[in-house]
Image (spheres, rainbow, N blue to C red):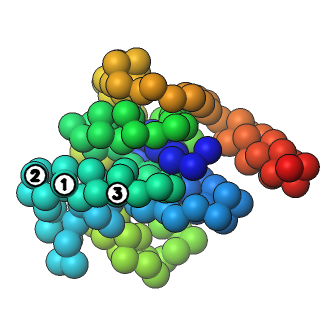
Amino acid sequence: MRKIMICGCGGSGKSALARQLGERLNLPVTHLDMEYYDERWQPLDSEAFTQRQRALVAEGEWILDGNYASTMPIRLTAADTVIFLDLPALTCLWGILQRRHQHHGSDALSRHLRGRITWGFIRYILGYRRTMRPKVDALIAEHASSHVITLRSRRQVRRFLNDLHVGSARA
């Protein structure tokens, strides 16, 4: 695992998993939200964002976390491992509340996300498995030429990390 793509619903724990994997595997981590928005939290135009991702996946090692379905094929074709966090909606909503409480908006991404927790965002999370998951599944089936790991609970995420740690310690 040297080129890892992590996707899933908002609040599923993509960024936390990316950070933990980065530490354990000594890989650079890029959060796509930080690449998509400029310093004033204005989104990049689609061509600039596409080119930024092409540059990121051209690197030898990386962990990229984020969704952005329109550019997902770029990451899927380059990744040697795809991790799809397919957690229940209530778990994701709880994750968003926890993140907001833990960070109190202390980092740039948390401050940005504070303004994005709207009823529309909550509806998106509640409907993610019904509306977005089929699209993500189709993109993975069409473009991923790598190992795909689907984790469906926080317990499975913890087990995955623990198994990875044990495996790394033996190597």
Q: How many marks?
A: 3
- 8 versus 55 height, above or below: above
Q: What distance separates the C-alpha of mark 1 from that of mark 3? A: 9 Å
Q: What distance separates the C-alpha of mark 3 from that of mark 2? A: 14 Å
Closer to the eye: label 3 or 2:
3
> Which element carries disc 1, helix, strand or loop?
helix
Label 3 vs 2, first from the N-terminus: 2
Label 2 packing within 10 angstroms: few (<14), some (14-19), many (20+): few
> Which element carries disc 2, helix, strand or loop?
helix
- 33 versus 79 height, above or below: below
- Identify which residue, 93 or 77, lies in the foreground: 77
- Identify which residue, 21 or 104, lies in the foreground: 21
Q: Mark 1 points at which residue?
A: 51
Query: Quarter of the image holding residue 159?
Result: top right
Q: Are marks 1 and 2 in contact (CB under 8 Å)?
A: yes
Q: Name the residue under label 3.
A: 56
Q: Identify which amino acid the numbered label 1 is placed on.
A: Gln
Q: Identify which amino acid the numbered label 2 is placed on.
A: Glu
Q: Mark 2 points at which residue?
A: 47
Residue 108 visible: yes
Query: Quarter of the image holding residue 109?
Result: bottom left
Residue 93 visible: no
